[in-house]
């Protein structure tokens, strides 16, 4: 569906700093931000501490664009998958992942604290066309605006009554390739980070990319302070080209070179995601090559179980092969985790909820 140009700009596209330059007097921008990102209102009339005249002026100049819920699925493990309809009828997914974190009370007793991570989308569809990815199957449809990216978090925080001051993590791992829509993605990251808004610090945000090397360099130069995740998935160019055609333009070495120059937060590491597919990339030989490839990089590896869907020839790997792969890397000093399969009962991998819905439509 082609995107229609709106006549009024969307207020969620702006950082508070930008709004301070646009709204007079400037301190009102902070109040607007608080109404949007702490109290989650959807109209200027509800911004009670603004003078009526300013409410009307803002309403005549800007629109607040909420997302519409098209579908919501709750998993047994507590994860919630959202399918959102954008203003123009296109749909995108976001997932709220819940993890219990062990914490200790002052008396030493254990208290469980919920840890939130939200996975958000940045495009409708994707141009990259990875062979294993459902999002790729619909091709590229549209870029999201910064406001539409921001709105996914605003909606989910409100929907789950997550306290305004409650920290959560954001991963740009939903539908789309973030570095192929870099300007809105970077802008959304600034909006998330604003201390007067949602205050989600850059080190709590992770941008995941299929490896557009030149854009990795560009992202680094923007100095946002976000974490970087690379979807590597293969250790030699031949296989990677088959799985991810983008590798013809940006090969593995070009990605490694760009990562080496990327500014990484002192306490952080670049995450290399490795989607494990049975009999395709799960051999010990691959584990060995991965180890040598990452030599000298402050990195960690996240192994992901391939999540099958109807019509794919790829298979989920055996647990024992996953474990052996992980053990090899860990044994040789590389941080390596296996991604918990959250929400498996609710079409977990991104693109799958949307795909189920589209199938019902035809
Ligand atoms: N385009 C970006 C971010 C979105 S994809 C990127 O590729 O990094 C987010 C992650 O979902 C990627 O690591 C991708 O490999 C993974 N993914 C795609 N299809 C999957 C599937 N069927 N099962 C499990 N993970 C999948
Ligand atoms: Fe696009 Fe990422 Fe899916 Fe590849 S894995 S097609 S880059 S969304």
Image (tube, helix red, strand yellow):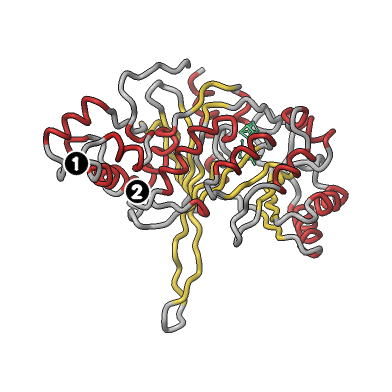
User: Label for residue 47?
Assistant: 1
Q: Residue 92, relative to residue 205: is it above or below?
A: above
Helix, strand or loop at label 1? It is loop
User: Is the C-beta separation of discs 1 and 2 under 8 Å?
Assistant: no
Q: Please tell me which residue lies in front, 56 or 2.
A: 56
Judge the density around disc 1: few (<14), some (14-19), many (≥20) Cα neighbours within 10 Å. Answer: some
Q: CA separation, marks 1 and 2? A: 15 Å
Q: Is residue 27 visible?
A: yes
Sequence-earlier tag: 1 or 2? 1
Q: Residue at x 57, y 32 (%)?
A: 176
Where disc 2 sits, the SS reads loop
- Residue 354 relative to residue 245: left or right: left
Judging depth in this view, the residue of 338 and 241 nearest the camera is: 241
Q: Which of the 4 quarters of the picture holds residue 338?
A: bottom right
- Residue 320 is tagged as none
Residue at image mark 2: 197
In the rendering, at what x and y percent does residue 14 appear?
A: 37, 36
Picture quadrant of ligand 1: top right
């Amino acid at each position: 569906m082609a995107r229609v140009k709106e006549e009024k700009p969307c207020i969620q596209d702006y950082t508070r700093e930008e709004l301070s330059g646009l709204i007079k007097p400037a301190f009102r921008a902070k109040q607007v931000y608080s109404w949007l990102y702490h109290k989650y209102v959807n109209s200027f009339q509800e911004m009670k501490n603004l003078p009526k005249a300013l409410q009307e002026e803002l309403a005549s100049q800007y629109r607040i664009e909420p997302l519409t819920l098209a579908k919501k699925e709750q998993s047994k493990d507590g994860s919630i998958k959202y399918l959102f309809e954008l203003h123009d009828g296109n749909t995108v997914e976001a997932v709220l992942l819940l993890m219990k974190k062990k914490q200790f009370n002052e008396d030493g007793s254990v208290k469980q604290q919920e840890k939130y991570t939200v996975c958000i989308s940045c495009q409708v569809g994707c141009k990259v066309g990875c062979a294993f990815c459902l999002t790729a199957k619909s091709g590229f449809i549209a870029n999201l605006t910064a406001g539409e990216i921001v709105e996914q978090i605003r909606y989910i925080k409100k929907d789950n009554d997550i306290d305004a001051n409650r920290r959560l993590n954001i991963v740009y791992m939903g539908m789309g390739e973030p570095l192929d829509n870099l300007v809105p993605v970077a802008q959304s990251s600034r909006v998330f980070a604003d201390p007067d808004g949602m205050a989600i610090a850059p080190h709590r945000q992770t941008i995941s990319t299929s490896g557009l090397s030149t854009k990795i360099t560009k992202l680094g130069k923007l100095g946002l302070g976000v974490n970087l995740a690379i979807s590597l998935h293969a250790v030699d160019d031949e296989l990677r080209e088959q799985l991810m055609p983008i590798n013809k333009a940006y090969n593995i070495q070009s990605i490694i070179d760009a990562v080496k120059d990327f500014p990484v937060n002192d306490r952080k590491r670049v995450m290399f995601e490795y989607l494990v597919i049975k009999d395709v990339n799960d051999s010990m030989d691959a584990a060995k090559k991965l180890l040598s490839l990452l030599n000298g990089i402050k990195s960690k590896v996240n192994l992901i179980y391939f999540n099958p869907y109807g019509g794919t020839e790829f298979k989920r790997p055996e647990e024992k092969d996953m474990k052996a792969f992980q053990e090899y890397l860990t044994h040789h000093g590389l941080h390596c985790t296996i991604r918990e399969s959250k929400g498996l009962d609710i079409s977990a991998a991104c693109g799958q909820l949307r795909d189920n819905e589209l199938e019902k439509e035809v």
